[in-house]
Image (cartoon, rainbow, N blue to C red):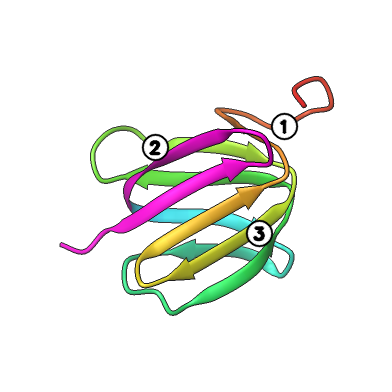
Amino acid sequence: MAELEVEIVAADHFVWSGAASMVKARTADGEIGILPGHSPVLAILAEGELAIQPVSGERVTVGVDGGFFSVDSNRVVIVADNARIGGAVTADAK
């Protein structure tokens, strides 16, 4: 079965990477869901929550406050201004 190679980084730290079966994010144009085999995409990431379904394990959520989202050849790269696993990025968490 095909899978996505996902990497999430913030401006100043590594956030998460691994194999996933699905990634969901909010972009400037609306919500997007990525499955293996998705066509290439480059989008501006909006403030909100990313959802990643790892190939094994429980769903991972990451709060972000902007950045960009790239998909190409089953590789998803998310570069966020600020990001935090498990919740929203607030002024206190930055």
Q: Earlier in the sequence, mark 3 or mark 1?
A: 3
Label 3: state its secondary structure: strand
Q: Residues within 10 Å of mark 1 (few under 14, many from 20)?
A: some
Judging depth in this view, the residue of 1 and 16 nearest the camera is 16
- Which one is in front in this view, the residue at disc 3 or the one at disc 1? 3
- x then y, percent, for residue 52: 43, 45
Q: Earlier in the sequence, mark 3 or mark 2?
A: 2
What residue is pinned by disc 2?
59
What residue is pinned by disc 3?
68
Residue 46 falls left or right of residue 23: right
Q: What secondary structure do most residues of the magenta stretch adopt?
A: strand
Farthest-out residue, right: 91
What residue is pinned by disc 1?
89
Indicate whether 54 appears above or below 75. Answer: above
Label 2: state its secondary structure: loop
What's drawn in magenta, residue-wise? 1-20
Q: Amino acid at mark 3?
A: Phe
Farthest-out residue, left: 1
Quarter of the image that includes the C terminus: top right
Residue beneath the point at 39% across and 37% down: 59
